[in-house]
Amino acid sequence: MRDTTELRDGLADLAESVAPTEGYEGEIMRRAGRRRGRRRIAAAAAAAVCVAVLVTMFRVVGFGPAPQLAAPPPDGPFLGWSPVGDVDAGLVREATSVWDRANSAGPHTDVRALVATRHQRLRSTVVVLQGYDKQGGARLAFFTGDLGAADALRMRVDRPVPDPVKTQVISLVSSRLSGAAGEVSDDPWGTYAIALAMPGVTAVRVSSTAVDNEMIQEPDGPTSRLVVKELPISATAQTTAIAGFVKPKRPFASLTKVFEVPGEDGVDGDARAVPAEVLGRNGQQIIVALPENQGVRQGQLAVTAEGLVGRVAAVDTARGEATVDLVTSTGFTGQVYTNISNVPGFVRGTGGKLVMEGVPADGEVYQTNRVLMPDPSQRSSQVGAVTIGRASADKAAGATTVELTPTADLANLTRLSIMTPSAP
């Protein structure tokens, strides 16, 4: 081929001899469509298989319906709970003997143990018994050892048995669980919370607003339903919360919280918390309704789990009401100290704010430091001391005043407790 024109003409001559089959283009398109369709069906089938596998895996692992607790049937008037761990028969006999001698309530009959073991955290024994007293009343009692008397068992509290159908956890919170009966611990972390949950609970968490941390017990342990936690000496049942968790027996499943309740009570010698319902607000005061014959008096502290609300200014026994000065009111004053660092001072309400005054010039108070007020219903300035607020800012060098932010929600109060001395 000498030039491009000749090349083009030659190619045209060759093309004329090619006779394409009729409908060739349509057949090619139909084949391509069928192949694309088969590929789409195969891809869809593969995706469906993947989804099915994933759904099955999710059901096997940590997904699926939230776990539910099934309450064990009651044992007559008693909790029908299986004991925690191995029950020490010797401890049960010793505790029953102590129980029989206490308050002339014995002999106790049909006694059954929920706990009878030595607990490492308490460094002592823990026993929880149910049984009938000599009047035929169904009772529940907690016992712990006396570290100052060769760990001899002491009865800490004797209560009526709780509702065996509705109860999910029983608890005891006090600074009087390690020594002689009624004796306050001299350890700054001498308050103990004992919590025992119903069968089916995997782990129990005990937390307190008296301390800025919380811990979930390792699940699946042999005594995971039982927790003994050490708390600051200021902690009380009113500042303690107990939560129960369930972990399904599936790989990678997570803990699910199934309940959270306040701590139940303390022991003999602890201040009693009288529940009160807020009726209304009168300027810088609130009016609360009281149960009958609860011994509420002027000067006692009104508290919530988060901290101090105020102080009882007046009691109207005829109406069953009390007037409480809020901590920010101009009528509120009191002695306080900072937690841990123990810097002393006085607080004063200004009508809208709360100020800590009389702080030593060289005293160090930093932002968010916790400030405590002693509870006059307690027998110690440290036991059950109530958090009134936190420092709003660092105290300036050489200053003797620092503003506090109350820890209780004063604007949205509906219920509170008034701390009263233990009955003689």
Image (cartoon, rainbow, N blue to C red):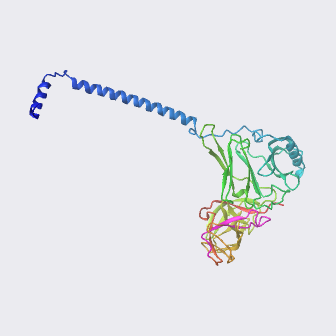
On screen, residue 145 above or below 83? below
Whether residue 134 is visible to the viewer of this picture, yes or no, is no
Pick the front one: 296 or 166: 166
Residue 8 location (% of width, % of height): 11, 31
On screen, residue 174 above or below 222? below
Whether residue 26 is visible to the viewer of this picture, yes or no, is yes
Magenta residue check for 141 = no
What secondary structure do most residues of the magenta stretch adopt? loop
Q: Residue furthest front?
A: 2
At x 78% / y 46%, what residue is drawn? 161
Quadrant of res 58: top right
Residue 296 location (% of width, % of height): 75, 64
Pick the front one: 306 or 78: 306
Pick the front one: 1 or 229: 1
On screen, residue 64 above or below 349? above
In which quadrant will I find the N terminus? top left
Residue 282 location (% of width, % of height): 62, 69
Callout count: 0
At x 65% / y 69%, what residue is drawn? 327
In which quadrant will I find the C terminus? bottom right
Residue 108 location (% of width, % of height): 87, 44
Magenta residue check for 380 = yes
Q: Is residue 414 left or right of residue 194?
A: left
At x 36% / y 27%, what residue is drawn? 38
On screen, residue 17 above or below 418? above
Range drawn in magenta: 370-396
Pick the front one: 195 or 269: 195
